[in-house]
Image (spheres, helix red, strand yellow):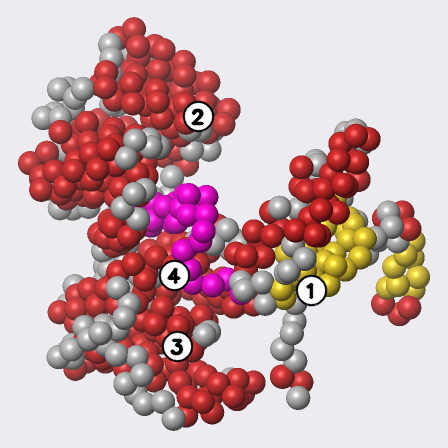
Amino acid sequence: MSGADATLAAVAREETGRLVTALYRRFGDFDVAEEAVQGALLEAVTQWRRDGPPRNPAAWLTTAAQRNALDLLRGRGRRRQVTERLAATTEEAVPAADEAVGVDADDRLPLLFACAHPALAPEVRLALTLRAVMGLTTPQIARAFLVNESTLAQRIVRAKRKIVATGIDLRVPDDVDGRLPDVLAVVYLTYNEAYVASAGGSEDRDLGADAVWLAGVVARSLPRKAEAWGLSALLAVQHARAAARFTARGELVLLRDQDRSLWDRRAIDQAGKDLQRAAALRSPGPYQLQAAIAMCHAEAPSWSQTDWRQIATLYGLLTDIDPSPVVRLNASIALAQLGPGQAERALAEVEALGAHLAGYHLLHATRAELLRLLGRPAEAAAADRQALALTSNDAERRLLQTRLRRHPLTDGS
Amino acid sequence: MKYVLMFTSDPSQAADVTQEQAQDVYGRIYGWFGEHAAVISDSGAELQPVETATTVRTGGVVVDGPFNEAKEVIGGFSVIEVPDMDAALAVARTWPGLELPGVAVEVRPMVVDYSQFE
């Protein structure tokens, strides 16, 4: 990442949400506010790469965004009255963030609730959040998700139009508990996308780190919400292991084979503290349980010295709350580690899930592992080949191909 | 902002509703209009059953039945005026009919700004 790109990534993350909110509060039009900031970010990419980053990047972005907002409003003829009123406003109308904007960290929260609004289609909430809250550009989002840029742009335009037309305001709803799961889901998906895409994803933005940061913003803004801390802990502990997930050549390394000295111990300790904070609020939930499971792995000295009994117990609790096939699949992996007798049970459970997850490559990869554990290599190889046929992720494909090479089979073995 | 609440139901599921249940909900719908009088800018109308619908199509062709073949039919509508979408959704959520199977309330903002036609 070049110096200009690194500066922009940091400033974009810190300032975008604040600027969109400030411009919305000033001009009363979400579409204009968001478009103005996105335009400023795109200008910054070109100009900062050419001339180097400005002395005060936040102020530069603020000025550019405000100018864009005024241009957009002038360009929209039917907003004549607004434009006339604005004609007199000076360029200083929205101060830079490092001066007194009157917008603090918590002011990103209303924006986040609007972007994750249930009136928007679930698949567009994530893209809109990445743009309006995190300051990713549409090309960056398209690259990260491997989707067509113009299709993505259209989807975002439609979502913004709906926000404006239906009168979705930027505010923290009265029913925070009812709506928080939607916000947390968007943050979780941000990390999930980064996790899956990390082999080939966007190089000018570390989406995984961005998701961890956003989870922290939400938790600090809503300090009494246990699941917000739980999600913050979960993403932080997952991200703390990021350096060990790939070899220098980009090969995927499974948890059992990871070099645990590469894990970020300080981040793991911090995640542990966040999780304790969540637990003290006595309102358990799926993110806290997932974080607790991830902490068990993070604190184990090795795969074989992992507290599998604790993990299997936590999965039991998680399955009670969320009996979805993917959770049960993961639970069965933990179960299999408890002893040879349990591996049989785990395999039976995985087979039973086959009807729901037949098209999910990790079902077949898990079956392969369990079959190998039970000394049935021919069936294991067949399952790995099924998994291979079902994933298009390069890193996962290479891992499966390596596994198939390492366990060569002759016919009838 | 002004929103139209469209009260829809699925007649095929109406058979599961007992007479007492329907009467109970109907009674509370009356109360609902009282409770929300402050935000109801037009109480709108309740429509006769969908069997009474007649549709005029392109070219003036008159046909029997509603305008589309969806399972859900519109049974009535009201106009409310509230500050934003969240407030509109909060009002829609309290519609007593939502206790019955197949009932839904569609929330649509009303066009109120005609300045582009000036």
User: Is residue A187 in the magenta section?
Assistant: yes
Q: What residue sits right under mark 4 in the picture?
A: A111
Q: What residue sits right under mark 2 in the picture?
A: A323
Give amino acid for label 4.
Leu
- Give coordinates of residue B29: x percent, y percent: 73, 45
Nearer to me, B99 or B15: B99
Distance (Cα) linking label 2 and label 3? 46 Å
Q: Chain of mark 1?
A: B
Residue for point 37% across, 15% down: A347
Which of marks 3 and 4 precedes in the sequence?
3
Nearer to me, A345 or A128: A128
Q: Check chain identity for marks 4 and 2: say if they share one.
A: yes
User: Is residue B65 in the magenta section?
Assistant: no
Q: Hey, which quadrant is residue B103 in on the image? A: top right
Compared to A303, does A19 lie above or below? Answer: below
Distance (Cα) linking label 4 and label 2? 32 Å
Residue for point 62% across, 84% down: B116
Dominant secondary structure (helix, strand or loop) of the stretch shown in magenta? helix
Q: Which circle, 2 or 3, is nearer the viewer? A: 3
Q: Which circle, 4 or 2, is nearer the viewer? A: 4
Q: Chain of mark 3?
A: A
Q: Which circle, 1 or 3, is nearer the viewer? A: 1
Nearer to me, B23 or A267: B23
Which of marks 3 and 2 precedes in the sequence?
3
Q: CB of mark 4 within 8 Å of CB of mark 1?
A: no
Q: What residue sits right under mark 1 in the picture?
A: B41
Q: Secondary structure at mark 3?
A: helix
Classify the position of the C terminus of chain A by image quarter.
top left
- Give coordinates of residue A79: x percent, y percent: 52, 84
Q: Which residues are magenta?
A: A167-195
Distance (Cα) linking label 4 and label 1? 29 Å
Q: Which mark is residue A26?
A: 3
